[in-house]
Image (spheres, helix red, strand yellow):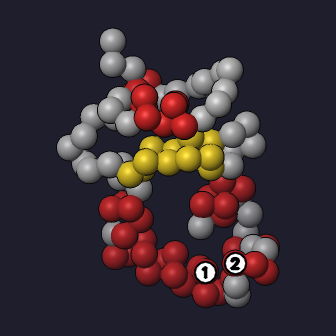
Amino acid sequence: MLWWRRTGVPWRDLPDDFGPWQTVLNRFDRWAKSGKWTRLFHKVHIVVDALGLPVTFEITEGQRHDSKPAKMLVARVMSRCLLADKAYDSD
């Protein structure tokens, strides 16, 4: 699902590794209607590489401030450059 959202390809063009495209579409639709996607991605903090591929992530409860997991996420990744969302600024 993440790959599909990142690339924007039509459902019919999903790689075979994901299974039949109709099955993936139906699951996505069911999860969207039940609110599962909203609950799942409400507080997921993801570090991606230059290609947009996930490197590490942290899932936090809804009441936790976005800047709290930032230090831990940055410590997990060896990088000379960092680009972060404004929500991670605690100054």
* Residue at which label 1 appears: 24
Is residue 12 visible in the rendered image? The answer is: no
In this rendered view, identify the residue nearer to me: 86 or 91. Answer: 91
Residue at 44% x, 24% y: name it: 86
Q: Which image quadrant: the N terminus?
A: bottom right
- Left-right relation of 27 to 79: left
| Rendered view: 55 above or below 16 | above
Q: Earlier in the sequence, mark 1 or mark 2?
A: 2
Residue type at tag 1: Val
Q: Which residue sits furthest left? A: 63
Q: Which mark is residue 51?
A: none
In this rendered view, identify the residue nearer to me: 69 or 38. Answer: 69
* Residue at which label 2 appears: 18
Q: Secondary structure at mark 1?
A: helix
Residue at 75% x, 73% y: name it: 14
Tag 1–tag 2 contact (CB < 8 Å): yes
- Left-right relation of 83 to 63: right
Find residue 26 and report its horizontal and vertical position in percent.
54, 84
| Rendered view: 12 above or below 59 | below
Residue at 33% x, 19% y: name it: 90
Q: Quadrant of residue 87?
A: top left
Q: Secondary structure at mark 2?
A: helix
Q: Which residue sits furthest top? A: 91
In this rendered view, identify the residue nearer to me: 75 or 33. Answer: 75
Q: CA distance from mark 1 to mark 2?
A: 7 Å
Find residue 52 and report its horizontal and vertical position in percent.
68, 45
Residue at 27% x, 34% y: name it: 65
